[in-house]
Image (cartoon, rainbow, N blue to C red):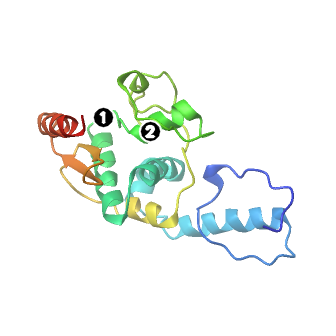
Amino acid sequence: TYYNEIDNIPYNQLIANTYLIDSSKSINDFKSFLLNYKKNFFNEYINNKLIKKYGINNILILASLIEKEGKDKYDKSLISSVILNRLNKNMRLQIDASVIASITEGEYKLDRPLNIKDLKYNHPLNTYIIDGIPSKMICYVGEETIKILLENPKSDFLFYFYNILEKKHIFSKNFTDHRKRLNEYRKKIK
């Protein structure tokens, strides 16, 4: 890092990546570079169906949720499909990462599991209590995650949870199946 006075750059002003920049450039030059990179990236997707439907800002917000939730490309693709399916059905997104961001305000790592009380925490980022897309991003987003979302992945899934024993998300098409699988999982971890 060559810059002594680095201000935090808001999540929505850049796409997370590894960048090489001449050390003689100022922090303002770097910020301009980041803004231009983001602009050029989205110019390539100007006719994308999801950008037309939700707008770039909401795509970035959704991608930030996927970034925090997904473990790999396959996982992020399925989570993207769940989010898009839920939005199309006017269902709340109910994403745990949004609850964690609500509680921590992005200032620290939550070092405990979420509980039922947390899911009811009144905060504008908490997708368990708000309808639709939150008002802002919860983290920086990588280019790959945005691309995965913009591919508009398809599935019939509406629910998922993370199974720590299997180290993967478990996806379900309906609430009955989701609840059954979640209850089976909870019995195993007690």
Quadrant position of the N terminus in the picture? bottom right
Quadrant position of the C terminus in the picture? top left
Query: Which structural element holds mark 1?
Result: loop
Residue 71 location in percent, x, y? 38, 58
**Amino acid type of the residue tagged 1 in the rendering:** Asn
Q: Are marks 2 and 1 in contact (CB under 8 Å)?
A: no
Answer with left or right where residue 88 lies relative to residue 4: left
Query: Which structural element holds mark 2?
Result: loop
**Amino acid type of the residue tagged 2 in the rendering:** Ile
Quarter of the image holding residue 130?
Answer: top left
Residue 99 location in percent, x, y? 45, 33
Q: Which mark is residue 19?
A: none
Q: Is residue 134 visible?
A: no
State which tag comes first along the sequence, 2 or 1: 1
Judging depth in this view, the residue of 102 and 83 nearest the camera is 102
Residue 81 location in percent, x, y? 29, 53
**Depicted 20 relative to depicted 159: above or below:** below
Q: Which mark is residue 90?
A: 1
Query: Which residue bears the numbered disc 2?
Result: 133
Answer with left or right where residue 26 lies relative to residue 35: right
